[in-house]
């Protein structure tokens, strides 16, 4: 993405005003593979009011906390903000359910996990939604795909670019793009 110079001398990426959504999963559901399920979910974004501007390749990483489970597939999409943050979150939860996500146990294997990472430059903390996502900056399987498509994107709270955050990640260090 191109960067723009704003008043005050600060550099901002064109991606800074977009919604950042992380996609992941390690169960294929009815789709044959996790990649196929993620592609199908991504294809539904526009119909759900989340038109995709850019998306990363799919990445792979070991399951956590049970590394014996299926590997995870992860990616990031940048979408236009057409719904308010709370409605965006509700839409993502509805899409997860549509693709067979069951929330029976924390950190359980799942067909689809959609996380609202950032909504433009908004800082928000409610009982149901914290923006930006409080742990995304620590996760290579989020920051790596984001840096792939928008390396100059800046974390709304930390002010650090996706490229720098990917290099400093402390969680999911085995995450790699699928060739």
Image (tube, helix red, strand yellow):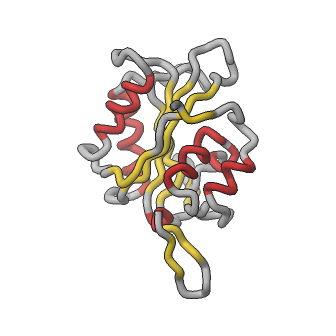
Q: Residue furthest left?
A: 47
Toward the viewer: 99 or 67?
67
Residue at 39% in and 43% down: 90
**161 versus 98 height, above or below:** below
* 109 over 19 or under it: above or below: above
- Residue shown at 36%/54% (left/top)? 53
At which x and y percent is residue 42? Answer: 35, 38
Number of on-image labels: 0
Q: Residue at x 64, y 63 (%)?
A: 157
Residue 8 location (% of width, % of height)? 60, 87
Vertical side of 109 occupied by 157: above or below: below
Q: Considering depth in this image, is 74 or 115 the residue closer to the camera? A: 74
- The x, y position of residue 117, in whole percent, is 53, 50
Q: Is residue 93 left or right of residue 43?
A: right
Vertical order, 3 against 65 (above or below): below
| Location of residue 62 in the rendering, given as x and y in whole percent from the top left corner | 64, 24
Left or right of 98 in this view: 178: right
Q: Residue furthest front?
A: 179
Residue drawn at x 43%, y 55% as measured from the top left: 85
* Closest to the observer, 2 or 120: 2
For residue 126, what is the image quadrant?
bottom right
Q: Is residue 67 left or right of residue 110?
A: right
In front of the other: 105 or 33? 33
């Amino acid at each position: 993405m191109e960067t723009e110079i704003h008043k005050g001398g600060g550099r901002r990426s064109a991606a800074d005003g977009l919604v950042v959504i992380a996609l992941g999963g390690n169960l294929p559901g009815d789709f044959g593979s996790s990649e196929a399920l993620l592609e199908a979910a991504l294809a539904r974004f526009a119909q759900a009011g989340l038109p995709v501007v850019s998306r990363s390749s799919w990445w792979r990483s070991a399951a956590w906390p049970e590394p014996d489970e299926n590997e995870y597939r992860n990616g990031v999409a940048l979408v236009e903000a057409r719904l308010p943050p709370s409605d965006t979150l509700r839409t993502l939860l509805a899409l997860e359910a549509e693709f067979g996500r069951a929330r029976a146990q924390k950190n359980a294997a799942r067909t689809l996990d959609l996380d609202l990472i950032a909504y433009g430059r908004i800082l928000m903390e409610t009982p149901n939604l914290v923006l930006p996502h409080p742990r995304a900056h620590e996760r290579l399987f989020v920051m790596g795909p984001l840096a792939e498509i928008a390396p100059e994107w800046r974390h709304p709270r930390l002010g650090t670019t996706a490229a720098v955050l990917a290099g400093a990640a402390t969680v999911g260090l085995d995450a790699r793009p699928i060739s």
